[in-house]
Amino acid sequence: MDEIVNVAKRRAFIYAGSEIYGGLANAWDYGPYGVLLKNNVKQAWWKDMVMKRSDIVGLDSSILMNPKVWEASGHIKEFTDPLVDCKECKQRFRADQLEADKCPSCGGELTEARQFNLMFKTHAGPVDNEENIVYLRPETAQGIFVDFKNILDTTRVKLPFGVAQIGKSFRNEITPGNFTFRTREFEQFEIEYFVKDALSAKKAFDEWVKVRFEWYKNLGIDPNNLRLREHEKNELAHYAIAATDVEYNFPFGFSELEGIANRGDYDLSQHEKFSGVEMRYFDDETKQKVLPHVVEPSGGVDRAVLAFLVDAYTVERAWGEERTVLKFHPRLAPIKVAIFPLVKKEPLILRAKEIFHGLKEKWFVEYDETGTVGRRYRRQDEIGTPYCITVDFDSLEDNAVTVRDRDTMKQERVPISSLPEFLEKKIGV
């Protein structure tokens, strides 16, 4: 993991948050290449889960919600961790993650475990009192549930259908420090998939487990680093009938990448009860109102980014030298193409910049004229650029360039006029 953290900073993927002030625990900033990678992950998810499907619509709900939402959802009562304090060094730990009854830092005596709510609490408005308490949402799901009736009333959706959302969530939990794996501020991509009844939910649950597992594989993750883990009954969340995690083999071991849960009709029934607003769906076939059941594929964007980064990270021997390369799937690579003039000579620079500006209309591309071509290749390898284009003196005569593949390092001559079509086939986006 140290190697991943180092290359992430060196190549402008991820920085420690507030670094010039000593940082803030488990707060991270995505740098110029990191934000492109993260956006590509989100765009790939949105395209595959929403755009390509006819049964899913999108939503962007508010982070701040009426506090009764969290009372209805069970978060105020149930969303807690058992924590203990060290009487000597005053550090706080999760009781369920300790292997002994002594402080892991100083060996001091620990207090009895107490339940602490994980939601960040703040106040809406200028008056700081109990009446104005609101919470930063700990999940994006509830925004979908409370807008369920609005979506029914204002669109033409029919069961089964899903509502998808990407957004920030916040949990004031103790984190183990595994880079961006678990942070207090994080981004989720979630779908709430509504079906008629329990039987339909069981079928949809099995289908979504397969869909989400395959999605990670199709974007380049080694299947040997993925596995499915069903939750035991005693570890299910208070709302869940069944749950299965897609787990990835991070450097610290297999851990949750995404969870698929059968939430039954818990959420809609709770919001119907607490709000007094009917959350039923009128079934045209049976002419009856039903309270839909819900299947939820819920993934962490930051965890997905970390998994793609870890899986892409490769150190190998090439031409007698060691090279570090990030073998991202082309859809995820921050920079798709880099363009080099062979040397810093004006005719080559002009032709290279002409190609650069032409390709920049479609993809994120880079122009680089500094250092030897070998050094420029190595830099692009470390940020995961699939293809590098070199403009040489022959290019001025034959109007062709040399295209080098990141993974195989093979080179081929391609006419400049054919570059857009060539790259479209290779990159696919």
Image: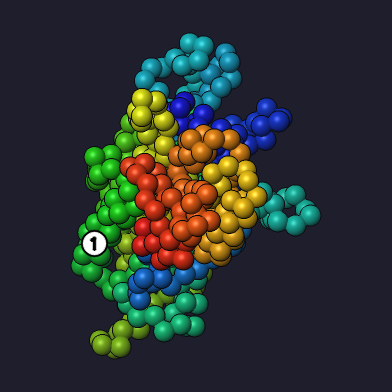
Give the image location of residue 8, x and y in percent.
52, 35
Left/right of residue 413 with respect to residue 77 in the rendered view = left
Q: Which residue is mark 1?
A: 207
Residue closest to the eye, 260 or 342: 342
- In the displayed structure, 44 sits above or below 342; it is below
Residue closest to the eye, 33 or 362: 362
Give the image location of residue 164, x and y in percent.
43, 65
Q: Residue at x 43, y 61 (%)?
A: 415
Give the image location of residue 407, x and y in percent.
35, 42
- In the displayed structure, 41 sits above or below 180; it is below
Q: Residue at x 26, y 87 (%)?
A: 285
Picture quarter with the N terminus: top left
Picture quarter with the C terminus: bottom left
Residue closest to the eye, 261 or 115: 261
- In the displayed structure, 371 sits above or below 154; it is above
Amino acid carrying mark 1 in the image: Glu
SS at mark 1? helix
Total residue callouts? 1
- In the displayed structure, 240 sits above or below 23; it is below
Task: Determine the residue located farthest toward the right in the rendered image.
Answer: 126
Q: Residue at x 39, y 80 (%)?
A: 157
Colour scheme in the image?
Answer: rainbow
- Can the viewer see residue 363 in this picture? no
- Can the viewer see residue 57 in this picture? yes
Give the image location of residue 382, x and y in percent.
47, 37
Q: How would you rate the neighbour count of disc 1 (Cα within 10 Å): few for under 14, some for 14-19, many for 20 or more?
A: few
